[in-house]
Amino acid sequence: MLDVRRLVLLRDLAAHGTVTAVAELHRVTPSAVSQQLRLLEEETRTRLLERTGRSIHLTAAGRRLAEDTERVLDALDQARSHLHSEPAEPAGPLHLACFPSALVPLAAPLGRALQDTHPGLRLHITEAEPEPAARLLLQRRVDLALTYRYTNLADPTPSGVESLVLGVDPLVAVLRDDHPAARAGDSPVELRELADSEWITAPAHTACGTAVLHACRSAGFTPRVRHTCTDFTAMIALTASGGLPVVLPRMAAAQLPPGLAVRPVADPALARTVEVAVRRGATQEPPVAACLEAVRALLPGGAPEDGR
């Protein structure tokens, strides 16, 4: 009988390329990973790894076994679902990854809702952006993940993960009241109205920074960026202090200091979908199904507007 935990280490080595990376993922030492992989070779009586100096690579047999591991793990998930085919009160630990700006408007009320409806569930929340959250799902370190995807960027969802759209979170312009584009009413702001301003943006390597940059270039200009940061609250504070515009998700802009205004952006493609991600085949497991039902109830008409 092959040890599933060792198979997971082999699968992760195929995905990440080094023993050190696998050790960091599993929070163990590289020597512990190497020892488990050697034991897996003994179990299979097959050479799975090629060692060249300090480098290690999978053999053809190792690659095949790593690919088969995904199917084994999927089958185990399906078996768990079959065990729960009869209605039962969900109970036990439930691990959720959540992106930062959804912690207040989604994760916190979700915890209260599950407490009220399924007191036997114990929710454990880990803050994570969508890409690391997907890795946590595939490593079976979390059961669900609240994620997002910018609609003008490619879908980053990896194979083995199912994403269900909960709502749309449009991007908005946050402006100081004395900015020319901060006119009264809710009329949309054209991005090109902000072309002559210096900007506050997320870094270009982030999804938000890339989405905003693409939208600006589609509008005919490249923004002149003065400040970059990943914290939406800090961006809003910089707008309040310096008067520079920032474009960010509405969910992050609901609680503003005095003197700032929120205006919709005229580009309908500039938005992000708020999603819940699960491992393929896991949606019928009672704890997962209960969490899906609860989070959908929090978003009956789209993304919440009381986040930060």
Image (cartoon, helix red, strand yellow):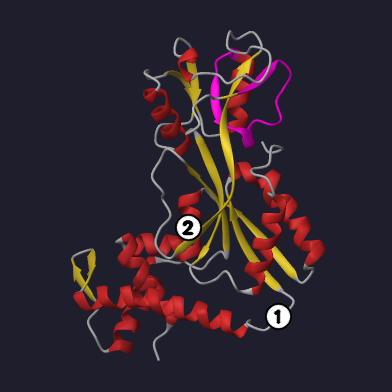
Q: Residues within 10 Å of mark 1 (few under 14, many from 20)?
A: few
Q: Indicate whether 205 appears above or below 45.
A: above
Q: CA distance from mark 1 to mark 2?
A: 28 Å
Residue interval drawn in magenta? 242-263
Q: Quadrant of residue 145?
A: bottom right
77 on left or right of 234: left
**Which corner quadrant holds the C terminus?**
top right
Three-letter code, disc 2: Ala
**Observer able to see residue 162:** yes
Q: Indicate whether 122 appears above or below 107.
A: below
Q: Residue at x 24, y 85 (%)?
A: 46
Q: Residue at x 20, y 75 (%)?
A: 60
Q: Residue at x 64, y 62 (%)?
A: 292
**Label 1: which residue?**
87
**Observer able to see residue 27:** no
Q: Residue at x 64, y 30 (%)?
A: 253
Three-letter code, disc 1: Pro
Nearer to the camera, 68 or 169:
169
**Label 2: which residue?**
134
Residue 270 in the magenta stretch? The answer is: no
Residue 251 in the magenta stretch? The answer is: yes
Q: Residues within 10 Å of mark 2 (few under 14, many from 20)?
A: many
Dot 2 lies on which element? Answer: helix
Q: Which mark is residue 291?
A: none
